[in-house]
Amino acid sequence: MVLIARQMTDLGVRHHKAEDLLDEWRASDLDLAADARVVESADGGIVGYALVRPPGVLAVVHPDHEGQGIGTRLLEWAERRELEHGHERHRQWAAAGNAGARALLTGAGYEVARSYWGMGCSLEGTPAVDVPGGMRVRAVDVDRDAAALHAVDAASFAGRPGYVAESLREFREEHLEAHDFDAGLSRVLEAGDGRILGFLLARRELPEAVGYVDVLAVAPDHQRRGLGTLLLVSAFAAFAAAGLREAQLGVDSDNPRALGVYERAGMSVLFRYDVYERPAGAPSRWRAYRDVDAAPDPDSLAGQLDGIAAVPFLAAEKQRSLELLELGAGDAVLDVGCGTGPELRRLAEIVGPGGSVVGVDRSALLLDAARSRGLPSVGTVELVQGDAGALPFAGGEFDACRADRTLQHLAWPEVALGEMVRVTRAGGRVVVTESRWGLVAPSLDQRVTDSILGLMATGSEQAGWVGYRLAAMFERAGLSEVRSVTGDHTVGEPDDFFRFTHLHGLAGDAARAGVVGRADATAWLASLRDLLERGEAFAMVIVLHVAGVKPA
């Protein structure tokens, strides 16, 4: 139902059946337990699905459950699985009308590599077929023809972008053993000596009365002679004779010759999928904050957090977030995602010796950095390693709970907020601070800018997008007296700018991932610093605070 709902929303047509899914799952090159994932809702319904195959990834989210971080989580899993398979490029398909998928993928550094068009035409008035002398067209005999068809297919498509070679067994499974494969409607074009010059594999889709062209291939030494058109028209005639009303097929944008053949046969585009790609490799620096201890250079991430905390305007915003907690002497407060603990001392001063301050973070490295700064010697402060999505505390244990620029790095921010509410007592306050920034530098190379900033995001949750949904999230979590406070700032002083945006690191990540050339990244950074020094570039930053009260 997830696939159907997605297709009806994005394409306006139903293009996938349960039998198609079962065909994919039976493939010998698929380990279903390792290569597929589903996401279940609280009531047990499936709301997301992803499958990793040698050609790439198909991942979908039910339209009614978009904006909940499901696509982000599936993307992360799929990329890890592709790396385990040894894929050189991350590749995903998404319907052209799926704006959410487009934002997710381009934000994660993907670019459209090619498109895939679904085409169709009516079979009414299909003409008879004239086969040239010395050739004949016949139906497919699976046992007799399988090896020859596989050889022609490999020779015809080898070298095409995105082509993944198949073994004979895989070819048979995918095409000749599909549940709706119809050997009688499929066509083989033979020379007088019995050599197969080309073939067309057809599927019969009922009750839609559609004949679907699964594969059309012509041997390389016989291409450009009209044989593809001959096979196509012959198949259309067979479709019509079998009582089918429509013919459909799919074609890649990197195969313009085939597209021309299909258009001349009277077919037109019904829908489009886009194929997104990016080089396989380490996750972006921004995504590394999700698991600092597993990052390639975790020490540098701790240093970046210190640099960000030193930016002047953030000090004022951090003070505002603490004031929104409305703490008093003797209160117990929890800081979720405390990192190196820059706010813990200030919290300890507010609650006094009779209160308690607990900082929780997933990263042992960041907590060690906090301890090295003497935080445990502050009597009211305790540091705990734990996950924001499963806080290791009893319900109602704290008078207040806060998170500062933490939820933007989580795949499931709603779960973390629910945990914050759970551990807060009735009448206690929950405060979450997030930020969003954008670069204003019109003179920079926009292509390089888009490529580098794209690595900053993994999707709609990354780089602070979650901040715009916080108020609604608070209300869904059952909090009352929800209040939103925002602060707008510009950052143009070069050192503060680079400390806050850490664009040096992002540019390096982009170069290492092959998203931009190393020379382009270096020149881009130099141009950006020059513009900053001349006052012709700056970052526009929005800081968002949302506070709420847990009702009795």
Image (cartoon, rainbow, N blue to C red):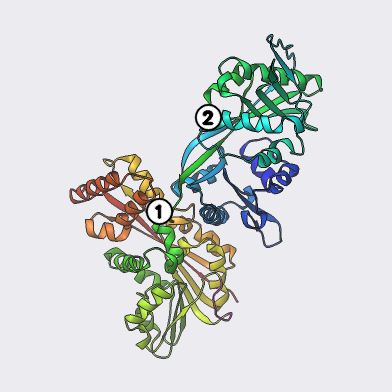
For the residue pair 365 and 330, the one nearer the viewer reads as 365
220 versus 542 height, above or below: above
Which corner quadrant holds the C terminus? bottom right
Q: What main secondary structure does the magenta stretch of the protein show?
A: loop
At 72% from the left and 48% from the top, the residue drawn is: 26
Residue position for label 1 = 456
Q: Which of marks 2 and 1 is nearer the N terminus?
A: 2
Residue position for label 2 = 253
At 50% from the left and 41% from the top, the residue drawn is: 276
* For residue 97, side relative to residue 339 (left or right): right
488 versus 171 height, above or below: below
Question: Mark 2 falls on what kind of element?
Answer: loop
Q: Is residue 393 magenta?
A: yes
Q: Is residue 533 magenta?
A: no
Percent position (x, y) of residue 364?
Answer: 43, 75
Q: What residue type is labelled 1?
A: Met
Task: Sort mark 1 into few (<14), some (14-19) or many (20+) by Cα contacts within 10 Å.
Answer: many
For the residue pair 494 and 27, the one nearer the viewer reads as 27
Q: What residue type is labelled 2?
A: Ser
Question: Mark 1 falls on what kind of element?
Answer: loop
For the residue pair 398 and 216, the one nearer the viewer reads as 216
Residue 531: tell me if it is visible: yes
Q: Distance between the residues labelled 2 and 1?
A: 29 Å
